[in-house]
Amino acid sequence: MNYFISLVTAIFLTSLAYYLGDLFLTNGLLAWHPLVIGASVVILGAIIEKLHSPMWLIILTPFPVGMVLLFLFLNVNLSHWFFTYALTLVVYVILHVAASSLFRFHSLIPAWKLSTKAS
């Protein structure tokens, strides 16, 4: 059950990043669009991780999915989409750092355990 809660939390945080990134620039997404993008990105990342793929593939695979879905849902020109996606990444990094430091939680791949050792 703990993994399910982590998965839902990761989907929520990723969806929130897409929602806020869009809200600050275009407000062009419907309420369910960020949820679809967040669920797609996180579940794909989790599946790739469960297949014991290399780290680079686990990290890179979800990006094109989020990028394409955002482009399709926004239905705007390429430069507008790019700025929205860039802002979404900034918001995601802020949310990820906050979730990681406050809750010891990896907000993209819930199965990844954060190290408790200092570097």
Image (spheres, helix red, strand yellow):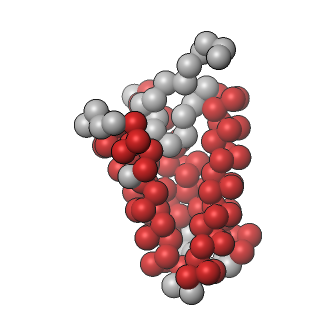
Q: Determine the residue located farthest toward the left in the rendered image.
A: 51
**Which of 20/8 is in front?**
20
Residue drawn at 59 percent across, 62 percent down: 18
Q: Is residue 42 above or below residue 18?
A: above
Residue 7 appears in the picture as rendered: no
Q: Is residue 105 above or below residue 48?
A: above
- Residue 33 located left or right of residue 111: right
Q: Is residue 1 above or below residue 88?
A: above
The N terminus lies in which quarter of the figure? top left
- Residue 96 located left or right of residue 2: right
Q: Is residue 106 above or below residue 33?
A: above
x and y percentages locating residue 35 in the rendered image: 49, 60
Residue drawn at 68 percent across, 78 percent down: 26
Residue drawn at 56 percent across, 19 percent down: 115
x and y percentages locating residue 97 in the rendered image: 68, 38
Residue drawn at 71 percent across, 46 percent down: 94
Residue 87 appears in the picture as rendered: yes
**Which of 101/13 is in front?**
101
x and y percentages locating residue 83 in the rendered image: 66, 72
Residue 3 occupies quadrant: top left
x and y percentages locating residue 84 in the rendered image: 64, 71
The C terminus lies in which quarter of the figure? top right
Residue 82 occupies quadrant: bottom right
Q: Determine the residue located farthest toward the right in the rendered image.
A: 24
- Total residue callouts: 0
